[in-house]
Amino acid sequence: MTSDPLEPTGERLIPDSQRGELVLAEHLARYRLAAQLAPGKRVLDVACGEGYGSAMLAAAGAESVTGADVDAATVHHVSDYHGVEAVVADIRELPFADDSFDLVVSFETIEHVEEPERALAELARVRAPGGTVVISTPNSREYLVDNPFHVREF
């Protein structure tokens, strides 16, 4: 766990830089919910960002956790800092076989994607029979600020 901290860009949550902020509490709540589903499961965390959530899922007793993110430096940080396997991957074309994971999570992601339907199809494709997909996206009517990184609001 020797990786340098990631620099805040406004696009992904950095817990150490955003302590005490509502956005951190919201993100942690999502992962706490998913952590209840993780024990004994093969888990994929798509758009894992900094990796704090992947680490929470692993600590909850997942059989395995794989983080996936489009940014190579972020993926390196997840593996190095949190000790969680992570790979560079685009949500629209995941590099995993069909039916690979019992639990697939992707929080605050599809609003960043040009083809959200394709992203959702990929999450379903890698989910094993009987598995679960858990996603979230901001409610545009309740969101406190505009986000320039969002392609589409839901």
Image: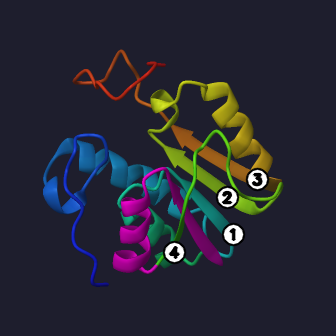
Of the numbered discs 2 and 4, the one sitting upstream in the chain is 4
Q: Which residues are magenta?
A: 63-83
Give the residue pinned by disc 1.
42
Task: Please say if the residues under marks 2 and 1 sit with CB atoms less than 8 Å apart.
Answer: yes
Real-space Cα separation, disc 3 to disc 2, in angstroms: 7 Å
Q: Nearer the viewer, residue 42 or 22?
A: 42
Query: Would you name the residue on which mark 2 appears?
Result: 103
x and y percentages locating residue 56 in the rendered image: 43, 69
Q: Amino acid at mark 3?
A: Arg
**In the rendered structure, which amino acid carries the disc numbered 2?**
Leu
The quarter of the displayed image where residue 143 is located: top left
Left of 4 or right of it: where is 117? right
Residue 32 in percent (x, y) is at: 44, 59
Residue 19 appears in the figure = no
Residue bearing the label numbered 4: 58
> Do the residues bearing badges 3 and 4 touch, measured as CB atoms within 8 Å?
no
